[in-house]
């Protein structure tokens, strides 16, 4: 009987197989060497790709080059692979930047003064090419497209911060980054560069000259060589217009008694915003008020509350020391907030024993601003707030009442998200925080997957987590409010949006509800540092609407239910922005 012979090609493989069966250690050594070699090949190809991409996308331009020396037409990089660092923000040299009123307008009979010379304001210009775009293309609710503008490396059109990313630049990313820093305009150039500013200081040109695709999205254009695609940002209420480290507060009428309202003052030769802000910072005041050639310093007080802003046109007067800034005049002051901390509302302590039997809840659905409200209440009252839970991260950030048992009686109010009858009736009174469910759900989703001030990743938003979250949490938003209205013994309703819009009045009402005497100086101090370290950037929006039509139909129905319940208790209904459109 003949034995079937093995195929000639199979014999070497069979020998190798038998060899490694007898020597398993050698087999695993072979596999390890194979994987190591593969990894080295992969890494090598990755670095080669990065180098070639950087060279091709920017003609070898160095993404970390200083603003004054950036070349939009070409140049050579001093080292390979620097494109990997292109996402680094950089402040340009401290050139005069305008954060106050608009200086020059081209419409009407407005005259451009001679001192404007080299930096004409083209902010009010409108690109003819932009008119051809549809409303959807021009206005996405976050920014409005203005047009294509000239940019000069020696004299930038937008003179705020800038950053480059030669691989992943998108229109939204540039807009979001500029908006976060409080700028009014965002401009994209050469497909990969982002510039921010408060004023456009260059003329507009034909739309055909802004013809380069964004490196991170081929469907949009990001300027061209020496050309900027500029958007005007629709900044939300909390956006801060800045001058270096100082925050622009607005134009205000001269207080009746200047010496009492703003106790420090000096005449400054060649007045500039820098000089006044620096003087008030050195004297440790939180406000710098420019009045022509005079600089006043002080704190917000009942004599100078900063509540009644005037039209910025009333403060139009050129600073002697810088061409593009307004320094106000004798009747109307331009006011900036310095980096000096106002300490009048920073002291906090635990409650004395006399309050120990009165338990007040600070109740809210998760994501409705409870932590922010605690921050405001602690500053306004000088007493710590407590919590039904324990969060070590909040304790480490200054909420010392976090470690106390919620029944200890040492805290002015107690944070809770509970909504059962038994839990609600354990409190003698409650401040019920309500927030637009569309915003509250997104805030809580971000907290759940990104922490107290972090953000959920795109994978979470686009994955199964978000639909499941809305399905489970949206009904809770409504039932939470309905339960507190039904079972709460004494309830004060505060809408998150109202508190943001008029912090002084609403916070004053909350302090009175808590049974404490109101200190206006403390409340004014709170206004100057209302955000604390517990505010997530309100400007970083998703590039798309995460709510499907089915989700919206469900949430809109819940809003109507809550609105009806509030009105039945003779309370104002939900704010206008909640209501289904």
Image (tube, grey):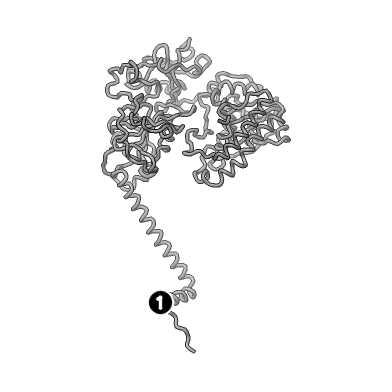
Please tell me which residue lies in front, 156 or 578.
578
> As drawn, which residue projects farthest toward the top?
256
Asked which quadrant contains residue 361, the reply is top right
Asked which quadrant contains residue 251, the reply is top left
- In the rendered view, tell whether residue 541 sits above or below residue 498: below
Say whether residue 255 is left or right of residue 151.
right
Residue at figure coordinates x 34%, y 52% from the top left: 49
Q: Is residue 111 visible?
A: yes
Please tell me which residue lies in front, 237 or 555.
555
Residue at figure coordinates x 39%, y 30% from the top left: 185
- In the rendered view, tell whether residue 210 sits above or below residue 513: below
Residue at figure coordinates x 54%, y 39% from the top left: 547
Say whether residue 106 is left or right of residue 446.
left
Task: Find residue 206 and report its horizontal and vertical position in percent.
Answer: 30, 32
Residue assigned mark 1: 9
Label 1, secondary structure: give it. Answer: loop
């Amino acid at each position: 009987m003949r034995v079937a012979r093995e195929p000639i090609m199979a014999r070497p493989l069979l020998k190798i197989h038998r060899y490694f069966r007898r020597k398993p250690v050698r087999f695993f050594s072979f596999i390890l060497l194979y994987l190591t070699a593969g990894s080295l090949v992969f890494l090598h190809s990755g670095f080669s790709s990065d180098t070639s991409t950087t060279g091709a996308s920017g003609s070898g331009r160095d993404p970390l080059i200083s603003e004054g020396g950036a070349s939009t037409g070409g140049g050579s990089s001093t080292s390979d692979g620097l494109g990997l660092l292109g996402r680094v923000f950089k402040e340009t040299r401290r050139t005069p930047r305008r954060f106050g009123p608009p200086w020059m307008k081209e419409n009407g009979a407005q005259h451009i003064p001679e001192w404007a010379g080299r930096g004409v304001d083209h902010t009010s210009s409108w690109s003819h090419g932009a008119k051809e775009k549809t409303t959807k293309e021009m206005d996405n609710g976050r920014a409005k497209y203005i047009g294509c503008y000239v940019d000069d490396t020696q004299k930038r059109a937008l003179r705020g911060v800038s950053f480059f990313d030669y691989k992943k630049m998108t229109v939204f990313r540039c807009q979001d980054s500029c908006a976060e820093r409080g700028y009014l305009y965002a401009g994209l150039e050469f497909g990969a560069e982002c510039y921010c500013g408060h004023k456009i200081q260059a003329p507009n040109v034909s739309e055909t000259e802004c013809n380069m695709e964004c490196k991170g999205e081929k469907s949009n254009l990001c300027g061209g060589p020496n050309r900027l695609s500029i958007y005007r940002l629709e900044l939300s209420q909390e956006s801060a217009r800045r001058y270096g480290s100082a925050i622009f507060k607005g134009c205000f009428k001269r207080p009746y008694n200047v010496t009492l309202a703003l106790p420090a003052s000096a005449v400054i030769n060649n007045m500039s915003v820098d000089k006044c802000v620096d003087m008030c910072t050195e004297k440790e005041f939180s406000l710098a008020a420019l009045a022509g050639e005079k600089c006043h310093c002080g704190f917000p007080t009942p004599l100078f509350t900063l509540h009644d802003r005037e039209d910025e046109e009333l403060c139009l007067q050129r600073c002697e020391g810088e061409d593009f800034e307004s320094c106000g005049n004798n009747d109307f002051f331009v006011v900036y907030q310095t980096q000096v901390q106002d300490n009048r509302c920073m002291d906090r302590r635990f409650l004395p024993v006399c309050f120990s039997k009165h338990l007040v809840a600070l109740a809210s659905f998760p994501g409705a601003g409870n932590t922010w409200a605690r921050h405001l209440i602690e500053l306004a009252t000088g007493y710590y707030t407590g919590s039904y839970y324990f969060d070590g991260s909040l304790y480490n950030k200054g909420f010392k009442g976090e470690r106390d048992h919620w029944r200890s009686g040492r805290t002015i109010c107690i944070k809770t998200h509970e909504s059962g009858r038994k839990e609600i009736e354990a409190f003698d009174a409650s401040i019920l925080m309500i927030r637009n469910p569309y915003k509250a759900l997104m805030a809580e989703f971000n907290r759940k997957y990104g922490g107290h001030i972090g953000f959920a990743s795109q994978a979470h938003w686009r994955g199964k987590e978000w639909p499941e979250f809305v399905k489970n949490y949206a009904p809770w938003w409504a039932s939470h409010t309905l339960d507190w209205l039904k079972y709460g013994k004494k309830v004060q309703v505060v809408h998150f949006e109202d508190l943001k819009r008029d912090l002084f009045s609403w916070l004053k009402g909350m302090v009175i509800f808590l049974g404490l005497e109101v200190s206006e100086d403390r409340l004014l101090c709170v206004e100057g540092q209302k955000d604390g370290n517990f505010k997530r950037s309100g400007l970083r929006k998703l590039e798309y609407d995460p709510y499907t039509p089915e989700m919206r139909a469900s949430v809109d129905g819940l809003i109507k239910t809550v609105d009806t319940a509030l009105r039945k208790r003779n309370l104002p209904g939900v704010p206008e922005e909640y209501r289904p459109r």
